[in-house]
Image (tube, helix red, strand yellow):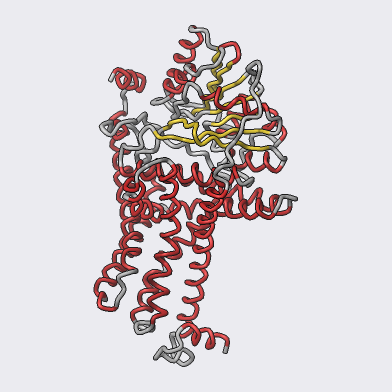
Amino acid sequence: MELLALSEVLSPASPVDVAANPMSWPVVTFLVAWLVILLVVCMYGFHRWSLVYLYYKHRKNLPQLQACFAELPQVTIQLPMYNEKYVARRIIESTCKIDYPKNKLQIQVLDDSTDETVQIARAAVAEMKAQGFDVEYLHRTNRQGYKAGALCEGLKSAKGEFVAIFDADFIPPTHFLHEQIHYFTDSQVGMVQARWEHINREYSLLTKTQAILLDGHFVIEHGARNRSGRFMSFNGTAGMWRKGTIEDAGGWQHDTLTEDLDLSYRAQLKGWKFVFLPDLASPAELPPEMNAFKAQQYRWAKGGAQTCKKLLPKILQSKMGWRVKTEAFFHLTSCTVYIFMVALTLLMFPALWFKFTLFQNHLFGRVLFDVSLFVIATCSASSFYVFCERELSRSWSDSLKYLPFLMALGVGISLNNAIAAVNGFFGECGEFVRTPKFGVQHEADKTWQHKVGFFEAKGWVQILAETLLAIYLTVCAVMCFTHAAQKITIGIPFLLIFMVGYWYVSLNSIYGQWAGARAAREVEGASPVAVEAERREK
């Protein structure tokens, strides 16, 4: 009787007798699943709106310097790297150009490399030492703890009271330390984070879209959380820590793949304050190749799930206010949205089938399968990134023209990130797979295509699944166009976004695998050091 009542509420004028029709149970089951997924997606979409609201509400709550150091303190800069032959020299030389007294600055090159990066980094360190810089080269013969392990090992010999960290693909501005260090005159400040900029933003459609995604994270998310008193995260690079904060929070731990997020929450639970400086930007390289981008996204999603599993119960049981707890819940569980996006994709065909049969003459069916999905799953994200780009003083055309592809890429990457989230919640910690750096800066630079990419047999299984989903959604799109007379025009753009996203990700993944295999064959037997020397000459 309860099921019958539900069906009558959903479609009171339906010509189909749901209680008598053999399809009634599948229909009701499907509707419940569909509405639950919509509710969850809507909830996280509303959370995006809340971040925009918080950002503008606390827009004027900018970080204020309380004082300045009369004498600059000792600072250690850590440069963790692993097989970064294309960018290792650049980051070492760029770090030595930072404007800070030489006698107050220590630079640690934390190299876990197993390739020619060792020789390149050693040579660069020797050159900088000869110029009077305090540069320490630390090479581990194992990757125990991965990046977290390297940072922890470096702290043992770190001279500085404050520790700045840069990944190998970053180019820190010369004024970086002077812009950050004085915020630590407040004894409660434990970490200061700068915004990321992108040296290859204009390189391709993929990098332009990634840049917008990261802009949204830094400008709106960090700005809203930090200025409203919620917890924010250190982003693993382009930030500075008080050494005592790291120690007080339990140090770098490697039981998750996002050691930065993990330490951030542990430190803030201890009462330490974080500062975000949106006007201080440090440029870095965006992955120019799809499989590299997917590897980065996979690590972030899996690590986020692991950190959620590890810390969310402690946060909810803590004495923090409900606003902090609520934001922490949405932040740490955001990786689960990808699981619901994949479920939404799989339900697309039955949704259309029911629309064209049981609900073809009912307003409810059109609203449920067209308007609600489009508004909930796209408009919240669209407005979020439009506000972000406007805050960065970009024109309306720059803010809007990439949004359809932005949404398509977010959908296309959802299977990759859903798998990562499930592994994070239920699997082992796993290996820290670095994001490949190719030293790419300009649109004309296609050197990454001649460098070894990802060529792993296990990658083809996921690519096949993404391709099958793209074909599946194409069938759904054809089905829509063949029933165009049934007034489904609002739902078609949403479906096309799904379809284009999966096709783009799968085809570019296939190309990346092929290019990686070809590059591996081409460089086999060649001298990598000679290749690097030739690249530098060019």
For the question of whether residue 7 can be seen, the reply is: yes
Quarter of the picture holding the C terminus: top left
Measured as percent of width and height from the top left, residue 15 is found at 39, 91
Of the pair 166 and 49, the residue shown nearer to us: 49
Q: Is residue 291 left or right of residue 271?
A: left
How many numbered dots are placed on residues in this image? 0
The quadrant where residue 518 appears: top left
Of the pair 210 and 363, the residue shown nearer to us: 363
Of the pair 82 and 201, the residue shown nearer to us: 201
Query: Residue lying farthest front?
Result: 60
Quarter of the picture holding the N terminus: bottom right
Measured as percent of width and height from the top left, residue 205 is found at 31, 44
Query: Residue lying farthest right?
Result: 319
**Rendered view: 442 above or below 353:** above
**Rendered view: 68 above or below 387:** above
Q: Is residue 310 left or right of residue 380?
A: right
**Rendered view: 475 above or below 26:** above
The residue that appears at 26% across and 76% down in the rendered structure is: 483
The residue that appears at 46% across and 80% down in the rendered structure is: 26
For the question of whether residue 505 can be seen, the reply is: no
The residue that appears at 47% across and 32% down in the rendered structure is: 281
The quadrant where residue 189 appears: top right
Q: Is residue 507 left or right of residue 239?
A: left
Measured as percent of width and height from the top left, residue 155 is found at 64, 25
